[in-house]
Image (spheres, grey):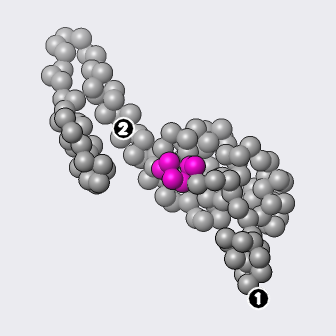
Amino acid sequence: MVLNQAAPILVLLDLIQEALAVPPQANRGEVSTGDHRLVELVERQSEAQRLTRLTPAENEALRGVLAGLSATEIALHSHHSVHTIRSQIKAILNKLEVRTQVSAVAITHRSAPHRWLYAGPATFTNFGDDPATGQSTS
């Protein structure tokens, strides 16, 4: 089977589901390998969708967490208060429907688009600064 990477994810999932369709095994009550793969794909899609709920500020805080920075270090780099960063981290955990930062990092590594995940380290600027140079625009 050949899949078009430009097709919407729901179309791709339908095609994969059709390809993995295996008749249920009689009298065993087991789930086939194909079904496990489909469940995993659907879960990854759900995780990716949850990542889109994050605000730009929460994305930057998540990048800091991915880089292994503490809330205090993220606050210093972003020129926000530690309280603000902790609030953003709590919002990230709620939106991703997880309890720990480690789980948030795992979801991000598993399900974030590669261009987001490997876009480089978090960059923090002051309001009014040019994001490309970090220099004041005024």
Task: Name the residue rendered at 73%, 65% in the picture.
Answer: 124
Residue 41: numbered disc = 2
Position of 14 with respect to 99 (left or right) is left
Position of 33 with respect to 18 (left or right) is right
Q: Main secondary structure of the magenta part?
A: helix
Q: Can I make out residue 88 in this image?
A: no
Q: Can I make out residue 22 in this image?
A: yes
Amino acid bearing label 2: Leu
Q: Residue furthest front?
A: 133
Position of 69 with respect to 26 (left or right) is right
Residues at circles 1 and 2 in contact by the CB criterion of under 8 Å: no
Q: In this rendered view, identify the residue nearer to me: 74 or 97.
A: 74
Tell me where the magenta segment starts and ends, as one range.
113-118
Q: Secondary structure at mark 2?
A: helix
Residue 39: numbered disc = none
Height in image: 123 above or below 117? Answer: below
The residue labelled by disc 1 is 138
Task: Name the residue rendered at 30%, 21% in the picture.
Answer: 33
- The C terminus: image quadrant: bottom right
